[in-house]
């Protein structure tokens, strides 16, 4: 008995970064301490708070999805090349509901949303009215008082059984170029960051986070220094876009694009990311075009295939190297999903997608991946894959070993790709004076993921000597 209620949960075991981190924690001095517990027992930090109602469930069976309570999985990325890299966590199902729990509405897709409203005795038309007040009609309601025009009994039911808000606004920082970084506090005290990037061509993009921290440990990424704290729920992802429209549409104009390029590896949290993307593109709600919602991955191949099969949204793949040797170092998940396997998977999967191009992201690191030979290899690597390539200027951060390639080097690299028949763009820094640029989000703290050994041939480029 705890706080007047009882609840139980079943856990579907999979490749869980918490287990991997515990298994290897003895060899990583930088890993935060885990709560003492046997290998297969869990400490739940808080009762579940996101309820989904699949149509296959009877009236007495409720499925609840909660964020992972695992700490940083930093140590698992200093492991040997054949280590089984984490693919993502399985869902957790709770069989009993704590008294007083409310449904977090932004965690439901429209089918679940309508079913939940009907289960309380109200009509589907009332569900649509509520949906539009949460996501459309320039209302973006955050509390019951903002739900104008709804039936009084309906509002009373909502106040008793529903929660409209998943995030709390902590701060908004404005960079000199107009980029905004929004800091949100979560219910458990953790903080995530969202970036809104205005563009003078009438396009404004919101960059959302999918995790608190990241388990991938990409060596050039500040978020990767944090390790993984936990996944975000679908509601916490969706509400970043809702908040961006609510707070900033008046200042920056219509927010037209969403990119899953904030904190975290989206495909490490695949269930919640696919669900959030589905909510973002719903025509009765936020109504983002699927072509303007882009989900980026470092290359988790099984989840990439699932995404291409289940989602209509756009895909970006963070490539950043043209050889396995370099990519194994700067992006350790390449140890499991080699470049050839990743690219051949894309080559095969995209045969079945019409008018679909993957976006390859390539962060330019001086002396590491920006040579003429790299450009020529990149042309060969992407042959047969419908794609665009985005060359990204590296954004320095505290503790970084890398330097950005010069503008002249980026232009030379771009020209070689263009001459080779590639569609190529260049993305320069936005918001870097407020640590809002690509690869700068998060706050690692005192316990950080490990830096991996620098290959000998790159030590000079990093001014480390031989």
Image: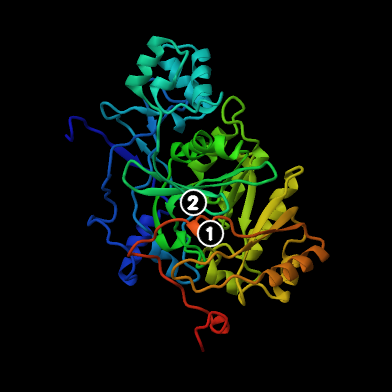
Mark 1 falls on what kind of element? helix
Other-residue count near label 2 (Cα within 10 Å), few / some / many at <14 / 14–19 / ≥20: many
Q: Nearer the viewer, mark 1 or mark 2?
A: 1
Mark 2 falls on what kind of element? helix
Residue identified by numbered label 2: 268
28 on left or right of 178: left
243 on left or right of 447: right
User: Between marks 1 and 2, how big is the CA–CA gap?
Assistant: 26 Å
Residue identified by numbered label 1: 432
Q: Which residue, as the protein is rendered here, is positioned at the far front?
A: 176
- In the rendered image, which quarter contains the N terminus? top left
- Residue 281: percent from the left, percent from the top? 60, 33
48 on left or right of 133: left
Q: Looking at the picture, tell me which residue is in the foreground, 167 or 336.
A: 167
Q: Looking at the picture, tell me which residue is in the foreground, 307 or 113.
A: 113
Other-residue count near label 1 (Cα within 10 Å), few / some / many at <14 / 14–19 / ≥20: some
Q: Is 262 above or below relative to 219?
A: above
- Residue 140: percent from the left, percent from the top? 49, 28
Q: Residue at x 27, y 58 (%)?
A: 34
Identify the colour scheme used. rainbow
- Residue 460: percent from the left, percent from the top? 56, 84
Q: Residue at x 69, y 75 (%)?
A: 371
- Residue 404: percent from the left, percent from the top? 59, 70
Q: Is 15 above or below relative to 275?
A: below
Residues under numbered marks 1 and 2 in contact, where contact means CB atoms less than 8 Å apart: no
């Amino acid at each position: 008995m705890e706080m007047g209620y009882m609840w139980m949960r079943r856990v579907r075991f999979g490749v869980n970064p918490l287990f991997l981190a515990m298994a290897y924690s003895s060899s990583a001095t930088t890993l935060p301490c885990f709560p003492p517990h046997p290998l297969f027992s869990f400490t739940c930090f808080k009762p579940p708070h996101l309820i989904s109602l699949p149509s296959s469930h009877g009236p007495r069976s409720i499925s609840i999805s909660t964020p992972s309570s695992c700490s940083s999985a930093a140590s698992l990325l200093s492991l040997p090349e054949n280590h089984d890299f984490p693919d993502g966590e399985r869902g957790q199902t709770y069989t009993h509901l704590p008294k007083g729990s409310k449904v977090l509405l932004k965690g439901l897709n429209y089918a679940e949303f309508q079913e939940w409203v009907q289960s309380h005795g109200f009509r589907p038309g009332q569900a649509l009215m509520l949906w539009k007040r949460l996501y459309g009609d320039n209302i973006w309601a955050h509390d019951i008082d903002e739900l104008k025009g709804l039936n009084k009994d309906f509002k009373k039911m909502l106040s008793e059984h529903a929660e409209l808000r998943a995030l709390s606004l902590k701060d908004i920082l404005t960079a000199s170029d107009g980029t905004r970084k929004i800091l949100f506090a979560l219910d458990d005290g953790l903080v995530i960051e969202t970036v809104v990037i205005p563009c003078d061509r009438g396009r404004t993009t919101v960059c959302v986070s999918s995790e608190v921290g990241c388990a991938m440990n990409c060596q050039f990424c500040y978020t990767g220094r944090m390790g993984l704290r936990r996944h975000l729920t679908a509601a916490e992802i969706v509400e970043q876009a809702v908040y961006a429209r609510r707070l900033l549409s008046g200042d920056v104009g219509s927010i037209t694009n969403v990119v899953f390029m904030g904190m975290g590896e989206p495909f490490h949290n695949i269930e919640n990311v696919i669900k959030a993307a589905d909510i973002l593109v719903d025509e009765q709600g936020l109504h983002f075009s699927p072509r303007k919602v882009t989900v980026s991955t470092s290359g988790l191949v099984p989840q990439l295939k699932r995404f291409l099969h289940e989602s209509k949204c756009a895909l970006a793949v963070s490539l950043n190297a043209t050889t396995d040797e370099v990519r194994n170092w700067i992006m350790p998940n390449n140890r499991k999903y080699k470049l050839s396997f990743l690219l051949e998977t894309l080559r095969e999967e995209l045969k079945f997608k019409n008018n679909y191009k993957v976006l390859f992201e390539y962060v330019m690191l001086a002396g590491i991946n920006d040579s003429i030979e790299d450009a020529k290899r990149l042309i060969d690597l992407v042959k047969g894959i419908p794609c665009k390539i985005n060359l990204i200027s590296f954004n320095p951060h505290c503790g970084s070993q890398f330097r950005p390639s010069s503008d002249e080097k980026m232009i030379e690299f771009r020209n070689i790709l263009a001459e080779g028949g590639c569609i190529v763009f260049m993305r320069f820094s936005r918001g870097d004076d407020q640590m809002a640029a690509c690869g700068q989000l998060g706050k690692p703290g005192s316990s950080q993921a490990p830096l991996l050994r620098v290959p000998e041939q790159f030590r000079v480029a990093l001014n480390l000597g031989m």
